[in-house]
Amino acid sequence: MEKERLYQQLFSISLTPMLIMNMDGDIQYVNDACSHLFKMNKESLLFCNVFNDPKRFFIERSEVDALRRNEEKVVLLKKKVDNQFPVHIHIQRTDQDIPFLVVQWKEFSSSFEKQEEVIRKMKQYKQFVKQSQDAFIVTQEGRIRYINPAGIRMLGGKRKEEYIGRLWLHFIHPEHLDVVKERMNQLMKGMSVHPRVEVKLLTKRGIVTIESSATKIKLKGEEAIQYIIRDVTDRKKYDEMASKSEKLTMVSKLAAGVAHEIRNPLTAIKGFIQLLKASKQYNEEYNDIMLEELNRVESIIQEFLTLAKPKVEQQYSVKSLNHILRHVILLLDTHANFRNNQIKSYLEEDIEILCEENSLKQVFINLIQNSLESMKKGTVTITLEKRNGYGVVVIEDEGCGIDEQSLARLGEPFFSTKKTGTGLGIMISYQIIEQHQGHISFSSQVGVGTRVEIALPYTTKKPVKI
Ligand SMILES: Nc1ncnc2c1ncn2[C@@H]1O[C@H](COP(=O)(O)OP(=O)(O)O)[C@@H](O)[C@H]1O
Ligand SMILES: [Mg+2]
């Protein structure tokens, strides 16, 4: 009770004119400074209604409507008293069961201007968050405290009440729970986290893939995490579709070369069998040649089928870059010969990398195929070297080259100068190499040829057997 009296005294002796009124404008309490401002004693002020006397109090009922409807907590008005000195009227809504409005009159001062500016900015920010296409979610102790309309839409709901108070982790796909928990812990400890992560959510609309960034903030004085989230499900689907269609084109293009290359040894084998049949004698040498040819046919078919098979789950393992390149070259040799081109390779260095083998094969096939397609008759040279922690694959051709304008457009989806091109190969190659924390660079001279460098970080871990 001591405290209460102290507060009453503070209210009463404050130099700032203050009054407390109910939502209808009936004055409940006034302080000395207030009665001084309005040149009325306290008792008569207590009989007044603020809204009924706007000339005296400078507050129109309509100006505080947002407070009365609980859409705002504070309203700031700037008025001139007696056409002389400007005052700021600060009206605040209390948080009780029966709320009141606390009105304070302040002389115009720069600090108030600042406060007004802050309030204006806060309003703008609130509006921005409300209208944003990105989802904004704030959690405290793991529970959702705020969610904007885009967030509600993303989770497939209709009203914020469906989500406020619920555990945020509840919406995270089990696959990503550990990552998200770890990020939350690190953020709360004040550590920096990777600015953006891709996470799957379980929503009423099904599984949604999002990209989110998280920051630690203060909400009503307590620590909280603010998430800004973008739904990337559609973009992922588009990427997958592009990747599939490029793969289909690649596989169908390769098929012609593969068929051609298989037909040659088969003709040879057939010839030997006919010879054997005619001579009715066993011939060791013929047998060896036939077996060798059959082995080659078998490995080409096997390589082709691994590539043509739909991708299941991306699995990273340590593989030898030389090995991967040799396989790709085996497959493309057929294609190159078919087109009067040749592939030369210098793969002395043994380099191990952590990778998704088939995706990398797809990149090398894309790029070597581009080189082959750029030449009428020529050589593609493939070398492999170690440079600053990277295994660098260099693919050089003697083809038509790429002019400066086109060079700048490489990697743009559907950018192609070919009649039957998809314009997706380089885009997908960029994506795959980026997923491997590597990079690709092109240099080219029109009429001379093109050089592509693919750098991939190598590992010192033991290789897993292929
Ligand atoms: N080695 C190269 N030599 C000349 N032009 C190339 C080379 N690699 C790529 N390009 C150019 O880049 C374009 C895009 O390549 P890509 O994304 O693989 O699509 P596509 O091969 O289906 O056209 C090609 O159409 C071509 O103009
Ligand atoms: Mg291509």
Image: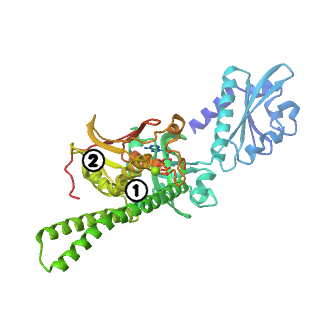
Where the N terminus falls, by quadrant? top right
Q: Name the residue beneath numbered marker 1.
A: 177
Q: Name the residue beneath numbered marker 2.
A: 353
In x, y percent, where is residue 335?
A: 37, 56
Which residue is found at the position 37% from the left and 45% from the top?
378
In terms of secondary structure, where does tag 2 sit? strand
In x, y percent, where is residue 340?
A: 37, 52
Q: CA distance from mark 1 to mark 2?
A: 28 Å
Disc number placed over residue 381 in the picture, else none: none
Q: Could one spot residue 434 in this view of the protein?
A: yes
Q: Earlier in the sequence, mark 1 or mark 2?
A: 1
The answer to whether residue 117 is above or below residue 128 is: above
- Going by the image, does 33 lie left or right of 244? right
Which residue is found at the position 69% from the left and 29% from the top?
116
The answer to whether residue 9 is above or below residue 86 is: below
In x, y percent, where is residue 21?
A: 76, 40
- Going by the image, does 425 lie left or right of 368? right
Q: Nearer the viewer, residue 134 or 416?
A: 416
Where the C terminus falls, by quadrant? bottom left
The amino acid type found where label 2 is placed reads: Ile
- The residue sitting at the front extreme is 278
